[in-house]
Image: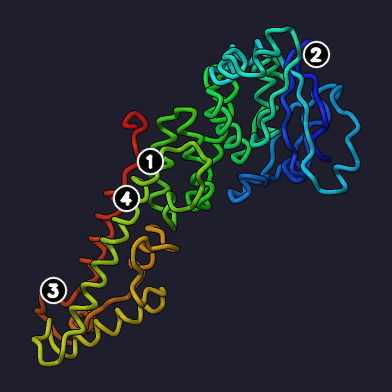
Amino acid sequence: MKLPNSCNIDPDGDLVLILLDHGDTCERVVKHLKGNITLSLSQSGSRAKRSLNGQVKVTPSESSHAVARKSSDAEDGQPQEIRLNVSSKHLTLASPVFKTLLRGGFAESKDLNKGLAAEVRLPEDHPAALWLLLYIIHGQPKRAPDWVDLGMLTEVAVLVDKYELHEATEIITDTWCTIIENAKYKATCSPNQHLQLICVSWVFRKPKMFFKRTHLAMRYSDRDLAAEGVTDLPIPIEVLEKVDHARTRALGLCLGKVQGFYTQYLKKPSDSSICSAYCDTMVLGALMKGLAAENLVPFPVSPYKGISYSKLSEALSGMVLSSLCEALVGMNLVSNLTKKQCSIKNALNRTVREAGLALKGLKLDEF
């Protein structure tokens, strides 16, 4: 089921908002407004690349707004218009952006000033997200969902930021954010989800969530978030650049240490040995085997796409890098051997640990 063609959010409204349903924008939507119903939502259109799929639990109502849709539009695959009858007064009170549009001398404001019904086309806005926000703006919070999933909350955040609806919707959106914060999204979530969580915490000004999610993105993201091409999420580019810089710096420190050992042990035979020829060969062989097993040869270069600090630290910590000297001591074949510089495992682990400790979440009030 797709979105119905029209809805009287305010039966006495003087403004019609015209949205576009691209067919799979909302595959299932509200049928009733009392009780609980779970809707599967999928998103395409101008933001399809973000793959914001998920579910939203909606409080249904008397379905007075479902009307017959034009079958010809459904058949030819063209985006369908959704007409929402709303109150311009409610919109101008809730949103400075709508106030400028509807009271600032534009064509729509001229119609309203003449007592005529006006129409505003919003083809780029997510229909379901705006629909839910309009219920809140019009004093009908009980018709809004009890909770929404991360995908839908991100769509809501985009519109809240676009129309400056923070204050008018915060009672409901605060509840949604709390539920998302408590949802325990895995640290190893996808890059898109990292972006969504940062977006939500930024738009709704959640300092603890922002600190936590930027920190987890630094540790668990396997690519630069600023390079993802997601230009329609309201996240300052400097936020993403700081997250990316911290991530690449940590990876650079770890991989630089490994590469330094690798180069050091590849010295020509005529060069002085680090320990002994036999011991050096054993360390180099173990290092090469470990790097090959983790697909780290040839050495990755910045921005280290496909590598996260979490995965790299786990891989490096798990490498067996024993030297001949350590093996002999372990087998009690020799005694009184002090730990020599041929033991690289501890030094590598120390670098990995220090790089991880340097990854700290961002503070919201610094932006």
Front residue of 19 and 326: 19
> If you read the primary sequence from the N terminus, does the residue marked by circle 4 or circle 3 appear first?
4
Front residue of 321 and 284: 284
Q: Position of residue 248 (x, y in %)?
A: 33, 56
> If you read the primary sequence from the N terminus, does the residue marked by circle 3 or circle 1 appear first?
1
> If you read the primary sequence from the N terminus, does the residue marked by circle 1 or circle 4 appear first?
1
User: Up-down: is 189 above or below 113?
Assistant: below
Query: Mark 4 belongs to which amino acid?
Result: Ala
- Please rate how many residues cluster around mark 4, counting C-alpha atoms within 10 Å: few if below 14, some from 14 to 19, many from 20: many
User: Up-down: is 64 above or below 244?
Assistant: above
Q: Position of residue 53 (x, y in %)?
A: 65, 46
Q: Secondary structure at mark 4?
A: helix
Q: Quadrant of the N terminus?
A: top right
- What residue appears at the point 50 percent right and 40 percent down from the top-left corner? 197
Q: Which residue is mark 3?
A: 339
Front residue of 299 and 113: 113
Q: Which residue is mark 2?
A: 11
Whether residue 332 is visible to the viewer of this picture, yes or no, is no
Name the mark nearer the viewer: 2 or 4. 2
Q: CA distance from mark 2 to mark 4?
A: 52 Å
> If you read the primary sequence from the N terminus, does the residue marked by circle 2 or circle 4 appear first?
2
Query: Mark 2 belongs to which amino acid?
Result: Pro
Q: Which residue is mark 4?
A: 246
